[in-house]
Amino acid sequence: MLKESGYQQMVGAELFEWMRKIRRHLHQSPELSFQEFKTAAYICEKLSELGISSQPGVAGTGVIAEIGPAESDWIIGLRADMDSLPIVERTGLPFASTVAGRMHACGHDGHMAMLLGAAAILRKMDLTGRVRFIFQPAEESGNGAEKMVEEGAVEGLDAIFGGHIDTHYCTGNMTVDEGIICAYADPFTIRLKGSSGHAARPHEAKDSIVAAAGLITALQSLVSREVDPNQAAVVTVGRVQAGETHNVIAEEATLEGTIRSTHPEARSRLLTGLERMVLGISSLYAVTAELEFPDFLPAVCNSASAAEVARKAAAAVISKENILSQGPSSLGGEDFSFYLQRVNGCLVRFGANVSAETGPAHSSTFDFDEAVLAIGAAWYAQVVLAFSQERVSL
Ligand code: NI
């Protein structure tokens, strides 16, 4: 058990129980990206329990709410994501998903519960500025944050903060870092088109599968030969689709993959290299090749000043010695980056390790330690306090 810390003074047993019920309710009723209709209605209901009015329907299923004095010279944004994943849950938890093939396997149920908990704490405080609670749809798929930004979610904000549950770390630890903490993600689709023919007479056809295989192998040299080895990067082809049957040469092959990078120059070398190889493969195998980059995701880059506020808040909640660095940037993507392109901010990680048997995020046996709900709620509230103090001392 953790020793008595700042968060336990801020989050009493009653509030913790309220958040835990919320988390479990949401866990039982997961919804996919941009389909978070029941989730949104439930969030609005919980906000109204707190006497906070909300604006649903932002970017489809997002919810925004604000508290604080009408006249103020600062506004801070706090964000939680709302969507689940297309996974069949196998945790055996008493509050497991009741929706077939849907699961909160990334902790977003916890993020919503802790942000509501923060709202419960903050509404009782005498705020000198405004706090905007941003419940965002479609973090997993569809870049919901980008749509929230388009619909004005960060309008007027001085800073934005968010946190993600991370079971690589123990409950009671948090990571706070400045700079890039999540990678640039460039998903790509490549369509190769040749011509079909009899498997036994390849000279009468143009085989798109052989071209695809050559390209997949060639792509693996992008990271090893074109990127500075000190700059982390990944090229993964995650989906290949081609052909109908064993004795027909496939006319078309489609490859889907993603490029991840953590340095702008590595990213640009990878993108140029990919374009060059796709072009090259078409002349090498006499097929036509098309390349598309749907849904680019920028890197999450925490500003130094916002990271400082996040660190102060974390020190008040879990004490200084429990604040860690995540080390080098993750190669994972996070659409929180879209907010950071417009406004100063910081995304942190909340440790919430349960046990060795529990699977990692995005697995069918994922779970997290619910004690993190109190830590997250207290941290969000402390961020607001630390931010307002920072402004006073400026
Ligand atoms: Ni997530």
Image (spheres, helix red, strand yellow):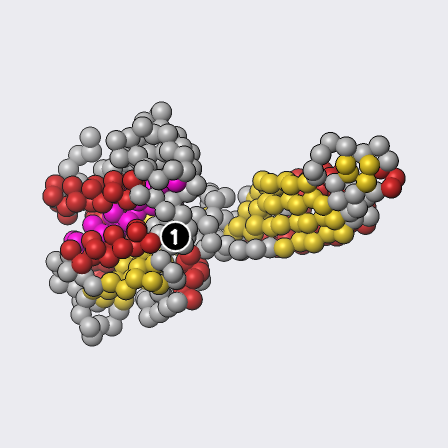
Whether residue 341 sits left or right of residue 120 in the image: it is right
Residue 229 in the figure: left or right of residue 247? left
Q: For the N terminus, which image quadrant?
A: top left
> What is the chief secondary structure element of the magenta stretch?
helix
Q: Is residue 381 visible?
A: no
The residue at the point 31 percent across, 43 percent down is 29
Q: Indicate left or right for 198 with 321 as reference.
A: right
Q: Is residue 217 above or below residue 265?
A: above
Range of magenta residues = 102-121
Check the image and name the residue furthest to the bottom.
71
User: Can residue 352 be seen in this snapshot?
Assistant: yes
Please provide percent x and percent y for residue 387: 25, 60
Q: In terms of depth relative to the viewer, which is nearer, 175 or 85?
A: 85
Residue 384 higher or lower than 352, as above or below: below
- Three-letter code, disc 1: Gln
Q: Which residue has dot 1 on it?
A: 35
Task: Name the residue located 68 percent from the left edge and 40 percent from the top edge.
Answer: 242
Q: Quadrant of the C terminus?
A: bottom left
**Residue shown at 24% from the left, 57% from the top:** 44
Q: Residue at x 69, y 38 (%)?
A: 244
Q: Is label 1's Cβ within 8 Å of ligand 1?
A: no
Residue 383 horizontal/vertical position (percent): 25, 55
* Image quarter of residue 366: top left
